[in-house]
């Protein structure tokens, strides 16, 4: 293990804790009360703001601003945090903000995520692992994004919305309600278009699981059965599959309500 490599033009505050093998590039700014884990790279002109904790093997690219104060009128300078896990790639001009009192004072990001250029993670978001946010995708405050989800470019997610595991939100979409696990949402405002078939295949889902999600899509959005009854029917037929059980629980627990289906598809289902 080696000492950090800090460019002479970088500013590193005295109280910042810099791990071994960290590389900090020209004109980067590391503020007080920052923790940066081993082997992380901070490129030229990037800034890591106060009260940010980063794990190991992250890469923050040039001009990204990580750990800024929340864009929330209720925020009045209280101490809050941004906590980031390991092996995240935060590309050029991406922004991430720390939490507020209403959200438990913590914005949290998991591991192995890709935040492409100009993406934004707002205050109090809870972002899981293995997530891709494409260029200019934006999360408003208090959003939850579960593991393995993909947020398409130029898309915006409304505050307090939840995006389920392995869900896919298409590009240039406006997401105002919850997008359940393994589903594909597209549009402004977004509607559920189909199960995320590509995601299911990439995850090596069985033919039984593929068929079950096609039925879940049909029964939940297009059967005409009241949703509580539809979920009970789905649970009776496919509740032995953990992915389907997770889908059912997500829909039942939704506070904002789940996305509607696409009315144009009703006659085709």
Image (cartoon, helix red, strand yellow):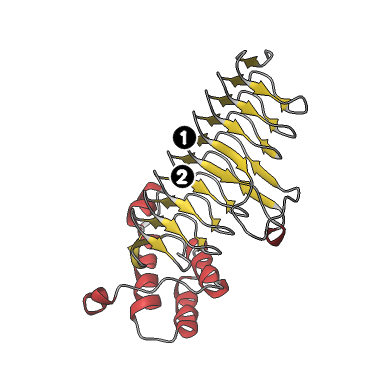
Q: Which sits in the foreground, 244 or 130?
A: 130
Q: Earlier in the sequence, mark 1 or mark 2?
A: 1
Q: Which sits in the foreground, 165 or 215?
A: 165
Disc number for residue 119: 2
Query: In the drawing, does residue 203 fall left or right of residue 33?
Result: left
Secondary structure under tag 1 reads loop
In the depicted structure, whether residue 68 falls above or below residue 30: below
Cα separation, mark 1 vs mark 2, equals 8 Å
Which residue does the image show at 60% across and 16% down from the upper left? 9
* Horizontal and vertical percent position of residue 267: 22, 79
Q: Which residue is mark 1?
A: 91
Q: In the rendered view of the protein, which quadrant contains the C terminus?
A: bottom left
Disc number for residue 50: none
* Horizontal and vertical percent position of residue 223: 34, 82
* Horizontal and vertical percent position of residue 254: 54, 72
In the depicted structure, whether residue 204 falls above or below residue 262: above
Query: Given the current orientation, which residue lies at the most extreme right position?
Result: 15
Question: Are circles 1 and 2 on residues that touch, CB within 8 Å?
Answer: yes
Secondary structure under tag 2 reads loop
Which residue does the image show at 59% across and 44% down from the upper left? 110
């Amino acid at each position: 293990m080696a000492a950090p490599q800090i460019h002479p033009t970088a500013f590193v505050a005295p109280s910042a804790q810099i791990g071994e093998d960290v590389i900090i590039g020209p004109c980067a700014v590391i503020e007080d009360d920052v923790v940066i884990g081993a082997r992380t790279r901070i490129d030229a002109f990037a800034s890591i703001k106060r009260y940010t904790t980063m794990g190991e093997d992250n890469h923050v690219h040039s001009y990204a601003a990580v750990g800024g104060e929340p864009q929330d009128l209720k925020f009045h300078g209280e101490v809050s945090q941004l906590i980031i896990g390991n092996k995240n790639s935060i590309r050029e001009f991406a922004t991430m903000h720390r939490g507020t009192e209403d959200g438990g004072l913590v914005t949290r990001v998991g591991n192995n995520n890709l935040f492409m250029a100009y993406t934004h993670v707002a205050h109090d978001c809870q972002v899981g692992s293995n997530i891709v946010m494409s260029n200019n995708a934006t999360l408003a405050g208090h959003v939850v994004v579960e593991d393995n989800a993909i947020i398409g470019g130029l898309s915006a997610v409304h505050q307090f919305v939840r995006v389920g595991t392995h869900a896919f939100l298409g590009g240039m979409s406006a997401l105002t309600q919850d997008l359940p696990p393994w589903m594909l949402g597209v549009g402004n405002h977004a509607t559920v278009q189909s199960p995320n078939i590509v995601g299911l295949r990439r995850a090596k889902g069985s033919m039984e699981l593929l068929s079950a999600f096609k039925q879940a899509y049909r029964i939940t959005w297009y059967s005409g059965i009241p949703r509580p009854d539809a979920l009970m029917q789905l649970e009776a037929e496919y509740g032995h599959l953990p992915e389907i059980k997770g889908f059912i629980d997500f829909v039942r627990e939704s506070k904002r309500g789940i996305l509607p289906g696409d009315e144009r598809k009703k006659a085709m289902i």
